[in-house]
Image (cartoon, helix red, strand yellow):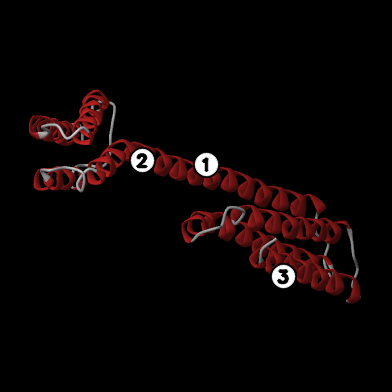
Amino acid sequence: MNREKKTLIVIYAVSVAVFLTIFFAIPFDKIATSWVAFSFAILSLVIGLCVSLYAIKDGKNLKSKVYGFPMFRLGNYYTIAQIIVSIVFIVIASFAEVPTWISIVTGVILLGIIIVGIVAVDNSREYIIQQESNDKIKTYAIEDLRIIIESLINKSSDKKSIEKLAEDFKYSDPISNEKTYEIESLIASKVLDLEKVINENGDSSSLINEISQLLKRRNIICKETK
C-alpha cells in the first residue's frame, strides 16, 4: 500500500471518528430522520473512500493520476455534499418535526447521482486509456521499421542513403490506419529484404529507392484519410 492510499484511509477514518463523536456526544433528540441522515453520512464516507482509492489504484505515473482525478474529485464532492445535507437534517430534526421520507429521498438522490457519475467518469477514463493504447499500437509498425533502418546505417556501404531513408521514416506520419496496413506490409517486406542485402554486402540502392517511394505513397494515404 503506497503513501497516498494510507493518507486517504487515515483522513477518512479520522472523519468518521469525528462525525461519530459529534453525533453521539452532543445531547439532542435523535428521531428517525436523524438516524437516516446519520446513516447516509457514514455511507457517504465509506463510498468516498472506496471511490478515491479506486481512482488512484493505477496511479503509478502522472498520467494515470490525471485520468483518475475527476473520479477522485467526484467521490469527495459527494461525501462533502451528503455530510452537509445530513448535518442540516440532524440539526433541524433536533427542534422540529421533519418527515423521515424527505431525508431518505434526498440521500437516495445523492447516492444515485454519484453512482451514475462514477460509471460515466470511469467509462470515459477507460475509453481515453484504450484510445491511447490503440494509438500507441498503431505507431509500432512504422517505429519498428525506422529502428531497423537506423540499425543498418553502420553496416551499409551507402551510409548517406540509409541515413536519408531513416530520416524519411522519422518524419513520416507515425499513426497507421486501415488504409495503410497493406502498403505498410509491403514496406516491411522490403525493409527485411534490404536488411538481408546489406548483411550480405549486396547492392542496396534500388531497394532504398523503392522503400522511399513506398513511404511517400504511405504518407499520401495518411493525409487523404485524415
Instruction: Point out the frontmost of discs 1 and 2.
Output: 2
Mark 3 belongs to which amino acid? Ile
Reading the chain from its start, which is encountered first: label 3 or label 2? 3
Mark 1 belongs to which amino acid? Asn
Q: In the rendered image, which residue does mark 2 sit on?
A: 135
Pointers 3 and 2 in contact (C-beta within 8 Å): no
Nearest the eye: 120 or 189 = 189
Instruction: Point out the frontmost of discs 3 and 2.
Output: 2
Residue 174's image quarter?
Answer: top left
Please, is residue 125 above or below residue 219 in the view? below
Quadrant occupied by the C terminus: top left
Disc 3 is placed on an element classified as: helix
Please, is residue 85 above or below residue 121 in the view? below
Residue 192 image offset from top left, x and y in percent = 25, 30
Pointers 1 and 2 in contact (C-beta within 8 Å): no
How many marks are shown on the rendered structure?
3
Q: In the rendered image, which residue does mark 1 sit on?
A: 123
Question: Pointer 3: residues within 10 angstroms few (<14), some, or many (20+)?
Answer: few
